[in-house]
Image: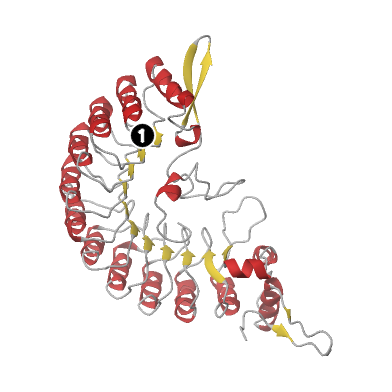
Amino acid sequence: MDSFLLELASTSQVDTMPKYISLDQQYSLTCEELKHPENPFIVRILQEVKQDEETLKKKITIKIAGNNRLIPVQKVTDDDFQILATIFTNNMFLTGLDLRYNLLSDAGAVHIAAFLQDNHTLLYLNLMFNDIGTMGAEFIAKSLHRNETLLHLRMTGNKIDNKGGMYFAAMLQVNNTLQKLDLGDTDLRTQSLIALATVLNYNSAIKAINLNRPILYSEEEETTVHTALMLKVNCTLVELHLCKHEMKNFGMERLCDALYENSTLRYLDLSCNKITRDGIKFLGKLLKHNATLEILDLNFNRIEDDGAFYLSEALTTHNRTLQALAVTNNNISGKGLVALAESMKTNLVLSYIYIWGNKFDEDCCVAFAELIKSGRLKPTGTDVDPYEVDGNTYFAEVSHGLKRHYYWTPSYGQPDNHDENASLAITPVAENL
């Protein structure tokens, strides 16, 4: 009998149907038994979990996110998680657990590690922006040496530092199950980035990795060079995030050289770097030959008009695989944006383009308005909405993009809405991506 669903034996011979204690009741009973005060936020979330037969067939993700703005929140502590682990450990339908923005620390990581070793159904665990440090990273990473079910782990925003990154690199040498690992904003440094890149030369399970915003002091881009060398030989990686890596044109050239030999990468995130038109020249040449890249995120660089021309030339004449291009805040003027709009008339594969934050003029606004009016570009496939005033066309911003809900969950609507998270519609890698 599954210990997560506590069966109440009926004394009546007529009523033989089992009755089950609800999750919130189990939580209350466990708190009472262990003399731990109940967390009203947890109680409310568990009360909302449906345990009907149809739901149990689909499996469920329980979201106990500490940044929930719709109901009163009392953030989950280390002791709270210990209680949750007690009632979740042997369940058969829990496949996802979202504990973002809570108060879990290294002490809580001990319980998380034990939970990961005992649980055999969890596919997705979100621990982003808790207070887990290097010691907690060690416990969690070592627990994954033996875990054979977890597919997606988000450690985003936990300051595990360089040493914590090394523990996860060591884990990837052993674990052959994990498909997506998110280590963005975790204060990784050069040594751990190089270690992770080296391990990915051999790991055949990881399909997506997020290494956003490391702390780098060197100007020589050693981490980008090692990442490029990895891409030459890796044949499983589908999604790579290198946001805020201080990458310049030299690093861009190294990556492009490597991608000529790569046949699997579909989503490349190079946003918030220092790439200029010279770096985009290498990328334009690559796009004329590359037949795998489907999503390219260049937001918050400085590619300017020349960079837009390089991209539009490749998209017009050669590339027929890229489906989404993001170039917001790149100091592109109307001429460059018109060139990109013109490329979409010939290239019928490119379906998503995001341009907000550049220098719009009348010609640019008219070009995109015509694309939308003709049906070539869907209104949900871009982040601008053309409108007219006194015969002139202007843009309004729309909340569409590749991953608008990476850091936060909307107050209404679906957090995995494909209009606001287009990458989910194009290249989904693992559950709860």
The answer to whether residue 331 is visible is no
Image: 360 above or below 255: above
Q: At which x and y percent is residue 319?
A: 26, 38
Q: Residue furthest top?
A: 390
> Callout 1 environment at 10 Å: few (<14), some (14 to 19), or many (20+)?
some
Which residue shows up at 66% across the image and 75% down it? Answer: 27
Image: 308 above or below 74: above
Residue ID for mark 1: 348
Q: At which x and y percent is residue 157?
A: 42, 57
Q: Is residue 210 left or right of residue 318?
A: right
**Quarter of the picture holding the C terminus:** bottom left
Q: Nearer the viewer, residue 391 or 305?
A: 391
Which residue shows up at 35% across the image and 30% down it? Answer: 344
Q: At which x and y percent is residue 310?
A: 22, 31
Of helix, strand and loop, which one carries label 1?
loop
Q: Is residue 324 left or right of residue 98?
A: left
Q: Nearer the viewer, residue 58 or 365?
A: 58
Quadrant position of residue 227: bottom left
Image: 153 above or below 379: below
**Quarter of the picture holding the N terminus:** bottom right
Q: Is residue 242 left or right of residue 278?
A: right
Q: At which x and y percent is residue 174?
A: 29, 76
Quadrant position of residue 312: top left
Name the amino acid, label 1: Leu
The answer to whether residue 267 is visible is yes
Which residue shows up at 48% across the image and 38% down it? Answer: 400
